[in-house]
Image (spheres, rainbow, N blue to C red):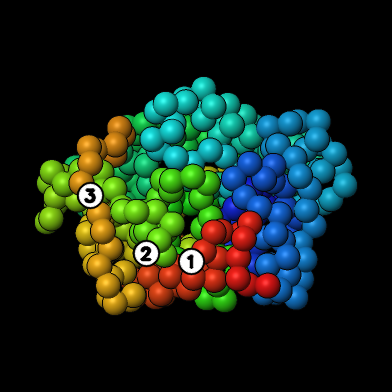
Amino acid sequence: MQILVTGGTGYIGSHTVVELLNHGDDVVIVDNLSNSHPIVLERIEIITDKRPDFIKADVCNFEKMNEVFSKYQFDSIIHFAGSKAVGESVEKPLLYYRNNIESTWVLVELMEKYNVPSIIFSSSATVYGQPDINPITEDFSYQCTNPYGRTKMINELFLKDTTVAYPNISAISLRYFNPIGAHESGLIGEDPQGIPNNLMPYITQVAIGKLEKLSIFGDDYDTHDGTGVRDYIHVVDLAKGHVAAVNYLQEHKDTSFLAVNLGTGIGYSVLDIVHAFEKIIGREIPYQITDRRLGDIATCYANPKKAKELLNWEAKFDLEKMCEDSWRWQIKNPKGYVRSNVF
């Protein structure tokens, strides 16, 4: 199949492109490189012996995307492109509402025009907000606590309405929990700009000496050690979930809209992750406790049963593997993609 992957040079996108190419699919990436690096394309080619087509463009640009759709006949779309930090979304809601909602509108408009039958949407567990109970199932109500989560919710509602109005379009919204880890080759991984918003790259950058110490945002949550509890999933497991979703919609063309959790079903606190990583590297990670971040919640972990039943997918890698692969990526790329030891 020929798959359009928006945001395909980003962290989750690049790992998904690798899995698609290894699966035998043809991939076209559209990315504006606002939060990624073009060298990712070379790394993907080294891993897979295949180079995806690449177009540098903003998915919100209808005219440019119309050119892309007129050139290719896509069998499906995986839509990663968008702004993704909870804290930043509170500070810059206009940016988040424009990037995250307009990009989906452009894609669906062009799907209808060019008869593209399916889309896999990159959603998030943030749509659940602070749930009353855990683990979280897909029938929980929307309780978003920040603009980032609300953009995911709005996109899901938009896709649900669209698939009702246009039965020729199917959609699966994959609600991710917390991806960490990297490809076992160490060639691709998470390369945030500035101080990381996500926990694992923050830990690895402290471990390698790029940052002085880890900031832990709050130690007064109602959890076993006071720090926030999340469901951490290896990014390769997450990527394989997208391949499974594409295949599902190829085989079940009468599907309208589905929301599916991608997680492990296990909750780890921030300090649990820190201590697991310390075991891998054999030394302590310096950290300080700071104020809570706006929009953060205490506990969030998945019930992944639906993914197993529908997509025949489940997470395979444990926390030790996640930490090992994250550390290997950081060692090989101490300053990220721009300056690395790989070549």
Circle 1 is placed at which residue position? 330
Query: Tag 1: residue type?
Result: Gln
Q: Amino acid at mark 2?
A: Ala
Query: Which quadrant of the structure image shows residue 40?
Result: bottom right
> Residue at point 43% right, 33% down?
88
Q: Secondary structure at mark 1?
A: helix
User: Which residue is located at x 27 percent, y 72 percent?
Assistant: 283
Whether residue 247 appears in this view of the structure is no
The residue sitting at the top extreme is: 94
The span from disc 1 to disc 2 (Cα, nearest Å) is 9 Å
- Residue 206 location in percent, x, y? 37, 59
Q: Amino acid at mark 3?
A: Gln
Image point 86% across, 42% down: which residue?
Answer: 70
Q: Classify 20 as above or below 162.
A: below
Q: Position of residue 22 (x, y in %)?
A: 67, 74
Question: How far apart are the two marked residues, 2 and 3, measured between alpha carbons?
Answer: 14 Å
- Residue 209, quarter of the rendered image: bottom left
Lower sequence index among marks 2 and 3? 2
Q: Marks 2 and 1: in contact by CB < 8 Å?
A: yes
Image coordinates of residue 330 in percent, x first then y, are: 48, 66
Is 277 situated left or right of 83 in this image? left
Residue 42 found in image quarter = bottom right
Which numbered tag is attached to residue 288? 3
Q: Nearer the viewer, residue 93 or 300?
A: 93
Judging depth in this view, the residue of 256 and 10 nearest the camera is 10
In the image, is 185 to the left or to the right of 313? Answer: right
Q: CA distance from mark 1 to mark 3?
A: 22 Å
Q: Give the number of the disc on residue 207.
A: 2
